[in-house]
Amino acid sequence: MRHWTTEERARQSALIQTWKPWNKSTGARTPEGKAVASRNAFKGGIHDLIREMSALLRDQKESMKLFQ
């Protein structure tokens, strides 16, 4: 891991202020690109767990109707 000195950090900050990369950032534009970007933070597991839990609860609800 790189450790920046105070001078290096100030110089880099000044350079970034001249480049202003945030002015050129557009994000995804096409539906395909947006679909890819929407999965950027996906770590896996939790969505599958939620889907499985929903299916189990749905099955349980259907089973409970039989006893009413």
Image (cartoon, helix red, strand yellow):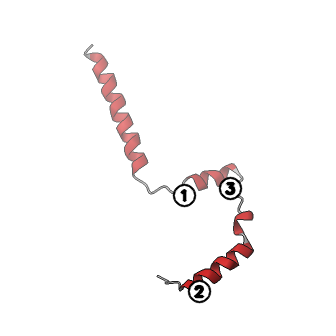
Cα–Cα span, label 1 and label 2: 33 Å
Q: Residues within 10 Å of mark 3 (few under 14, many from 20)?
A: few
Residue 1, percent across and down? Answer: 46, 82
Q: How many marks?
A: 3
Judged left or right of residue 50, residue 32 is: right
Cα–Cα span, label 1 and label 3: 12 Å
Q: Are marks 2 and 3 in contact (CB under 8 Å)?
A: no
At a point 58% along the width and 81% down the height, the residue shown is 9
At a point 71% along the width and 53% down the height, the residue shown is 29
Above or below residue 21? Residue 3 is below
Above or below residue 28? Residue 1 is below
Q: Which residue is mark 3?
A: 28
Q: Are marks 1 and 3 in contact (CB under 8 Å)?
A: no
Location of residue 52 (image quadrant)? top left
Identity, as a three-letter code, of the amino acid under mark 2: Glu
Identity, as a three-letter code, of the amino acid under mark 3: Ala
| Viewer-closest of 62 and 26 | 26
Identity, as a three-letter code, of the amino acid under mark 1: Asn
Secondary structure at numbered mark 3: loop
The residue positioned farthest toward the top in the image shown: 68
Q: Which residue is mark 1?
A: 40
| Viewer-closest of 15 and 65 | 15
Which tag is nearer the camera, tag 1 or tag 2? 2
Judged left or right of residue 42, residue 49 is: left
Residue 32, percent across and down? Answer: 66, 52
Q: Which residue is mark 2?
A: 7
The numbered dot on residue 8 is: none
Cα–Cα span, label 2 and label 3: 35 Å
Q: Earlier in the sequence, mark 1 or mark 2?
A: 2
